[in-house]
Amino acid sequence: MTELSQTGAAVGEPTTGAAPDAFLEVRDLKVHFPTDDGVVKSVDGLSFSLEKGRTLAIVGESGSGKSVTSQAIMGLHRLGTRGKNVRMSGEIWLDGKELVSAAPDEVRKLRGREMAMIFQDPLSAMHPYYKVGDQIVEAYRVHHKVGRKEARKRAVEMLDRVGIPEPAKRVDSYPHEFSGGMRQRAMIAMALVNNPELLIADEPTTALDVTVQAQILDLIRDLQKEFGSAVIMITHDLGVVAEIADEVLVMYGGRCVERGPAAEVFETPQHPYTWGLLGSMPRIDRETSERLIPVKGQPPSLINVPSGCAFHPRCPYADIPKGNVTRTVRPELEQVGTGHWSACHLSAEDRTRIWTEEIAPKL
Amino acid sequence: MISYILRRTFAAVILLLVVSAVTFAIFFLLPRLVGQTADQLAQQYIGKSPSKADIAAVKHNLGLDQPVYVQYWHFIKGIVAGADYNLGPTTVHCDAPCFGYSFKDHVAVWPQLTSRLPVTLSLAVGAAVMWLVSGVVVGVISALKPRSVFDRTFMGVALAGVSLPMFFTGSLAILLFTYQWPIFGRTYVPFTDNPAQWANTLFPAWCSLALLYSAIYARLTRSGMLETMNEDFIRTARAKGLPERNVVVRHGLRAALTPIITVFGMDLGLLLGGAVITESVFSLHGIGEYAVQGITDNDLPKILGVTLLAAFFVVIANLVVDVLYAAADPRVRLS
Amino acid sequence: MSETTKPQSADGEVLLRVEGLTKHFPIKKGILQRQVGAVKAVDGIDFEVRKGETLGVVGESGCGKSTMGRVVTRLQDPTGGKITFDGRDITRLSTGQLRPLRRDIQMIFQDPYGSLNPRHTIGSIVSAPFRLQGVEPEGGVKKEVQRLLELVGLSPEHYNRYPHEFSGGQRQRIGIARALALKPKLVVADEPVSALDVSIQAQVVNLMDDLQQELGLTYVIIAHDLSVVRHVSDRIAVMYLGKIVELADRTSLYEAPMHPYTKALMSAVPVPDPKRRGQKNERILLRGDVPSPIAPPSGCRFHTRCWKATQICATTEPQLVELRPGQRVACHHPENFADQAPGDTVLLSVAQEASALVPDAVLEESAQTGEAQTGPGAKTSTGKAAAPKADAPVEEPAGGEGAATDAPAAEPAAAAEETAREVAAGSEEPAAAAEADEPEAPKASQEPGSEESGSQESTGK
């Protein structure tokens, strides 16, 4: 019933109920927010899995549902004033525990301990009134019954590990006294203080300069090697993906349109939206051929997601498949290679032809 | 930091001088400008149908025949060094700080102010504690459950609290709790004499005053909390796995309350200059009531004294608030 | 912006010339609010922009590129220097005198949300320049605005809508339409696409490209994204801490960057090609953060993070000189070119730490290119000096001169240069020893290196 890819991912019809073998498995996840204007379907049926020691990059533009997915895994949507309104369904299995149906306090105990998160803007993500060290100490002491002194030692140790000079001194600094890169390092120290097995990084380098970005990506890679954790990297930058990811998941309009090993997705992408992303990106490693190939139009509204394939209004190839199929039938993920899946109505031949003849030469 | 406080204190002194000059000008210069003569002014200080000689004597004794700036100089000098008031037959010495001499009551203003200050202080501080606590608690709960029954109910009450005038709620409180069910005392007892009795008497006044302010504070806290709870650092706190209560109190409230300190300091400062209506309604002999006396009697030294005292409290509150703010928010540097 | 507009730019007429431009923001302190220092956001830069070309300005946050943009357009007053626009000195024009200039110089901002007044319709936003300048376009304002909207790819029916009804990309188009209303000669765009999604970014980049060709615009595009800058620019200025460190045409800059900072900056950009990930040996990681612009480092401002920094870098500020036609660099030890201070070979201790983060391949390549440029006779010692690993400390040369290496900054430049020469002479021994540890280094460099140090000393005296 469940098709298993090499990485152990379940797709298509999700098996419900049974605990998976994979370390993290998301099955048919839906996150909807009812509003006055209608239901915002931020994530609408997403499945993927991830093993320890691997890095999955979730790529998409703003409003594609990538950040909502990460916060859904962390259980952050159910908290606060918006928590009452969110509708969540599907399953999220983390290390044999199902999180969507779990009691809020159970999920809370996992947060920060088994799964941790770093955010885009480290300045606003840290509390401006508390010292960096105290914020790390707090993160450690929620999950460990230790004294302040011991926790502080641990904080200094973590700051040292993420490459902050003079950690014993910097532990008493406030976030605003750090530079952007240092703050993101401190955020990482805070996230990793409990040795989590899953690290979710939500655009961790978007707010940083390239040289600092290189430092931070390097650090995340090293730490992953050291701790063997699974990493979900959420980004819009395909450069960052190529830099760090083992697997890629491309999201559009709240759904996965393509997923597969990073090398393969970059080498032979199988979805017109992925082509569009690649064509839109100016590249530093190549002399400019001519013009960029943008994706026409605007990202879809998540309240009125286009019928059929959500990408069809922007897709230059929407008319190739026969009948009105792109406008009426929602394409499901189909296996197109080893562990490589794509949700597109185009036939395999058409895709290969368009990619090799029309797109690849222009990149 | 110290340089900052010094600079601010210096600025405060200048500001107070300006306030005193303006007030002085309003009460002593404006009447002249609109055509009142020194004689007419002097006449106010004497009984009915005075003789010309009396008027001339008073005019001279009070210095009303001198130019206004000389009068102002005497006033300022009096604050620093004390002053002598020649009352015809006798000369009264008014010790420094001398904020003028009331010719209606025949007493110096300053001792009056100091003896009334504890009353106003008791009223203001007690009410402030009440409105701060209740306002913040209601605001926080409302913010955490926006549009809930609690939120709607209390925001409705808050609206009523702001719109109901003091003389209505105050009179109602007196009527109900002092006369109908005489639970509370009627006459002010100093805290030092009997704390229980002190609180007992002031309680209705506190409640009435607090109702007015806590409504404002509940709304302030609510909007502040709503904003803060959407901040990224709240998301981080939750991502750490902190219990929601810690997230709200340690992370949310801490950030939301800091701007409220500013408003609170200013409100308290203003109240210390006299809660005019409340004191009148509850017959408390505080600064505010003194001001009312001054106004009804047209007793300029009283008004001037109260005005300066009030200005002093506001300026001090301002300074304290700024220093507190810097202490609460490490990003703020005083310079 | 693209190939088609590029070729003539070399001998094109200069539209904007900037000489020695500075912009300092004073810092005040104490009871009397005396000025105790200044944020040297822009600290002496020279460049020119020719008609019809696109000058890209890149640099990390805090390098002063945005301030530069605002000063050049006279949105802020310069502290010093001279700005010549279209042959006219505009450095000290008053607000009134600037008014006509505003027609010729327009700015596009980063934030498509913040730069449009939410209470005004698109029509009134785009027509504002006409009203402010008192210009009555042919066929009326409304018609002209609708033409502009069409020009930037919006529908003329959008005239009466409000900004919140538009997406980020569309708002940036509105911003562009407004900027183009008065047919400016120069458009300064500060991060025009960085707030936009990738697919929308490409739309806006293409639009700006089209408009340049259609209207003969001249662009100064300020951006932190080196890929975007490479795509749009004819020439590129790289800024670091308020200075231009390298200014070159696109091809030279990206294919043979000369300033180590440029090289590091470009190597840090992630490339969307996972196959290149294995080649980590290309990436140069810079240590730490950009220093404060309040007290920038002495000498070359990059010397605190540079893996090639020697004595002279800490003491003498390198001038922006044209080393190759069309490529100006401010560096004593440029990459891909002959060393400008060949006598100065002893690495600063910071440079040694920094070079630990620089892949060997980069060091080798730089040694080789340096050699190739200089020719066999005048071998530079940079390659050799950069090569030693951490376990071969160069800064402790034989004799007492080594002490001078650690405290150079405070000394007057002339004296320090003297010391540098002496140290260079003394350094041959450890440098040669280090070479033994580094088998890949060219063999021939050993002896010419020592010879050269000697000759340098004699010519110096």
Image (spheres, coloured by chain):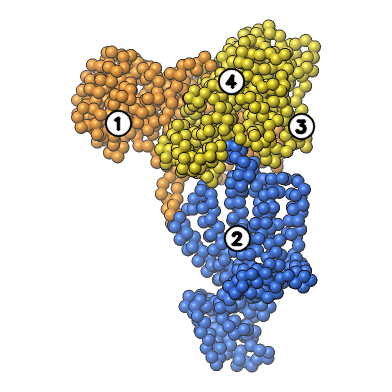
Percent across and percent down for residue C380 are 30, 20
| Chain identifier of the residue bearing label 4 in the image | A
Looking at the image, is A221 positioned above or below residue B136? above
| Chain identifier of the residue bearing label 2 in the image | B
* Residue under label 3: A39
Disc number placed over residue B266 in the picture, else none: 2
* Residue under label 1: C311
| Chain identifier of the residue bearing label 1 in the image | C
Q: Nearer the viewer, residue B57 or C288?
A: C288
**Mark 3 or mark 4, earlier in chain:** 3
* Residue under label 4: A51
Q: Nearer the viewer, residue C438 or C80?
A: C438
Identify the residue shown where x is 60% and y is 71%: B191
Is label 3 or label 4 in front? 4
Q: Colour of chain A?
A: yellow
Identify the residue shown where x is 56% and y is 25%: A231
Query: Which image quarter is the N terminus of chain C in?
Result: top right
Left or right of residue C41, residue C140 in this image:
right
Looking at the image, is C369 positioned above or below residue B51? above
